[in-house]
Amino acid sequence: MYDTRPRRYQVLPPVVKNLIIINVLLVVIQQVLWSSFHIQLADYLGLHYFRSDLFRPWQVITHLFMHGDPRSLQMTFLHIGSNMFALWMFGSILENSWGPKRFLIFYFVCGLGAALCHLAVLSLQYEPVVHGFQDFLANPSLAQFELFIRHHPPRGVDGRILDRLQSLYNDWSNAPGNSSYPKFATQFLHEYIYGAKDAAGVHVDGFLDEATVGASGAVFGVLFAFGFLFPNLELMLLFPPIPIKAKWFVIGYAVLELYSGIRNTAGDNVAHFAHLGGMLFAFLLLKLWRYRYGGRNF
């Protein structure tokens, strides 16, 4: 049944408050583990591609509570600060309107939807590389090695792995008949894709091992819901300081994310399609709820 009882407005309602507390605590734990033990918490709780050796099923949830990189305090503070500010600003209004249970369900549906969309986009980037490696394993020749390097230029991993690949390619090109190079190429390509252990036994990330962290997918879903339910409410932009209706702000943000995701600028490590995924699942859930409750302002 639809709950028509009036609710007392809370500046910091319980779900939003506890989400912020958990996120901040994990940032503190992340920094302590890195500075004291050189443990990267994102290896365990950040979202990894399913072919990565670091992937664990629980990461589709836990990545929502991870932010930034312990090696960069500035980036970490910016990441969690912007997400938690948006969660408080827009999420508080939604939780006061819906109640804690419905808001919590909405938040996690958007976060999970964002993760699924992000993994789908990653598959378009990663699967050709995996298949290229499988083609090499089927025919471990210099020609196939060259084909892999040309179609999938090694990038985005530890420089030591890239140096080994380049050195091997140069040596093999100078001595194409050397029978030991196919074995080395198989080992080095495996390390490039799946990672390796260094001399101290620490995992060195491979191409598939990049972790995705942050509540942004869920927060973008919250932002979309705010624009969906309160389309004509005016917001004040900071730069430039002009008023804009919520619906235009959300639409503009979505278009910017789509453009940024398609453009895929070098060095851009923002999961734009995860943001769009959060918005998409927010739209689907809101339409379902609106249909279920007969068009009432749930």
Image: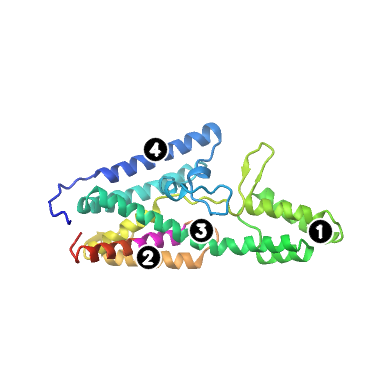
Q: Quadrant of the C terminus?
A: bottom left
Dot 2 and dot 3 residues touching (CB under 8 Å): no
Disc 3 residue crowd, few under 14, some 14–19, many 20+, Cα 10 Å? few
Which residue is nearer to you in this view: 22 or 3?
Answer: 3
Q: Label for residue 172? A: 1
Q: Which residue is mark 2?
A: 254
The percent position of residue 73, horizontal first and vertical second, equals 47, 42
Q: Residue at x 49, y 50 (%)?
A: 47
Residue range (magenta): 271-281
Kindly report the distance in space between the C-alpha atoms of the residues bearing marks 2 and 3: 17 Å
Q: Amino acid at mark 2?
A: Ala
**Residue 25 disc label:** 4
Mark 4, mark 3: which one is toward the viewer?
A: 4
In terms of sequence position, does the residue under pointer 3 or pointer 1 come before the other?
1
Mark 2 surroundings: few (<14), some (14-19) or many (≥20) residues within 10 A: some
Residue that carries the numbered disc 3 in the rendered image: 268
Which SS class for mark 3? loop
- Mark sitting earlier along the chain (4/1): 4
Seen at 25% across and 48% down, the residue is 100
Helix, strand or loop status at disc 4: helix
Kindly identify the amino acid type of the residue bearing the numbered disc 1: Trp
Q: CA distance from mark 4 to mark 1?
A: 50 Å
- For the residues labelled 3 and 1, the Cα–Cα distance comes to 34 Å
Magenta span includes 274: yes
